[in-house]
């Protein structure tokens, strides 16, 4: 009886081992099959048009043209996703002074995503017969031949340290405010070495301080809207805005005297300072209150 039980146990163990070996082989065949399938898919992808870069999406560019970006990244008809170097293309993009940073990512199966961050064009300076864009980092684009969407004001009379200061101030301004300034002139006086004059695109003149103009000008859209104008768009009350110390509206003497578009007479001795009561003053008062909060 004992021998029969032993034989039964032995047969059972053999059968169990055989089933286990069979199951292991099945798993191995399955794994091999999956790996073979993946390899075939990879080979199909690598050696067919599926892996060729078919589209490039560009984001974030305003002043750098898409054609310039495409030229820099140099995607050819036979460029493939698995051999294309995004790092080399990124380095090439950064050679453009207008580009602050660039990121290129691959999106399967065959698409490139190019994300651009640009240096702002904050102003223009005249060089001989041309106007040269100035970037927020102070770089002048002497050979720039594009069409800037945000070219900033023309800078007149600024040199060295003063030029660095006004560029820093312009870089702090919102683009829409900077776009409302047509020209900025450095106009130091005996006791006012940081005085500047701003001429806006809506025909307003502003006196300012080179060190504080960015903080003051952020309210300019409200200031401009507060001014009363006639049907032709001309100011009903002629004057200028003084942001050099506080914030006030100074009417010109005579009210409707003829003024030069680029250099109005703003000598305080010729203005009616006691008549500086205007709807604009409420907007200007906001600057004073905001400045008090920040100090």
Image (tube, rainbow, N blue to C red):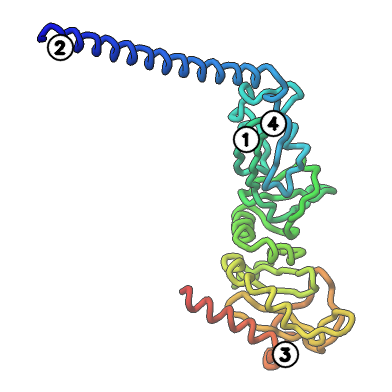
Instruction: Name the image quarter holding the N terminus.
Output: top left
Q: Which residue is mark 4?
A: 73
Q: Where does residue 133 sit, x and y in percent of width and height? A: 73, 50
Distance (Cα) linking label 3 and label 2: 123 Å
Which label sits on residue 5?
2
Which label sits on residue 107?
1
Q: Where does residue 131 sit, x and y in percent of width and height? A: 79, 51
Marks 4/2 in contact by CB < 8 Å: the verdict is: no
- Are there few (<14), some (14-19), or many (20+) residues within 10 Å of tag 2? few
State which tag comes first along the sequence, 3 or 2: 2
Q: Please say whether residue 190 is visible from this viewpoint.
A: no
Marks 1/4 in contact by CB < 8 Å: the verdict is: no
Distance (Cα) linking label 4 and label 2: 79 Å
Q: Nearer the viewer, residue 142 or 112?
A: 112
- Are there few (<14), some (14-19), or many (20+) residues within 10 Å of tag 1? few
**Secondary structure of the residue carrying numbered label 2:** helix
Q: Where does residue 84 sit, x and y in percent of width and height? A: 64, 24
Q: Please say whether residue 245 is visible from this viewpoint.
A: yes
Q: Nearer the viewer, residue 165 or 73?
A: 73
- Nearest to viewer (mark 3 / mark 2): 2
- Are there few (<14), some (14-19), or many (20+) residues within 10 Å of tag 3? some
Residue 201 position (above or below residue 126)? below
- Nearest to viewer (mark 1 / mark 2): 2
- Nearest to viewer (mark 4 / mark 2): 2
State which tag comes first along the sequence, 1 or 4: 4
Which label sits on residue 272?
3
Residue 9 position (above or below residue 97)? above
Residue 256's quadrant in the figure? Answer: bottom right
Which label sits on residue 183?
none
């Amino acid at each position: 009886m004992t021998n029969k039980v032993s034989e039964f146990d032995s047969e059972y163990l053999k059968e169990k081992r055989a089933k286990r070996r069979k199951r292991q082989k099945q798993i191995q065949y399955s794994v091999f099959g999956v790996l073979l399938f993946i390899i075939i898919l990879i080979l199909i992808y690598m050696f067919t048009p599926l892996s060729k870069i078919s589209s490039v999406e560009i984001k974030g560019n305003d002043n750098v043209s898409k054609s310039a970006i495409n030229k820099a990244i140099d995607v050819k008809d036979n460029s493939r996703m698995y051999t294309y170097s995004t790092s080399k293309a990124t380095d090439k993009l950064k050679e453009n002074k207008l580009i602050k940073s660039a990121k290129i990512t691959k999106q399967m199966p065959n698409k490139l995503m190019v994300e651009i961050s640009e240096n702002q064009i904050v102003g223009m300076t005249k060089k001989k017969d041309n106007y040269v864009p100035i970037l927020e980092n102070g770089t002048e684009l002497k050979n720039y031949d594009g069409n800037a969407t945000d070219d900033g004001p023309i800078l007149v009379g600024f040199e060295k340290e003063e030029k660095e200061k006004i560029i820093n101030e312009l870089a702090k301004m919102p683009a829409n405010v900077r776009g409302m300034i047509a020209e900025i002139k450095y106009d130091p006086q005996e006791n006012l070495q940081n005085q500047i004059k701003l001429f806006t695109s809506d025909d307003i003149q502003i006196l300012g301080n080179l060190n504080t103009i960015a903080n003051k000008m952020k309210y300019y859209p409200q200031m401009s809207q507060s001014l009363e104008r006639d049907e032709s768009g001309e100011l009903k009350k002629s004057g200028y805005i003084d942001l050099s110390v506080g914030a006030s509206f100074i009417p010109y003497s005579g009210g409707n005297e003829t003024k030069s578009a680029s250099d109005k007479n703003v000598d305080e001795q010729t203005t009616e300072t006691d008549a500086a009561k205007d709807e604009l003053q409420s907007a200007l008062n906001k600057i004073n209150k905001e400045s008090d909060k920040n100090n």
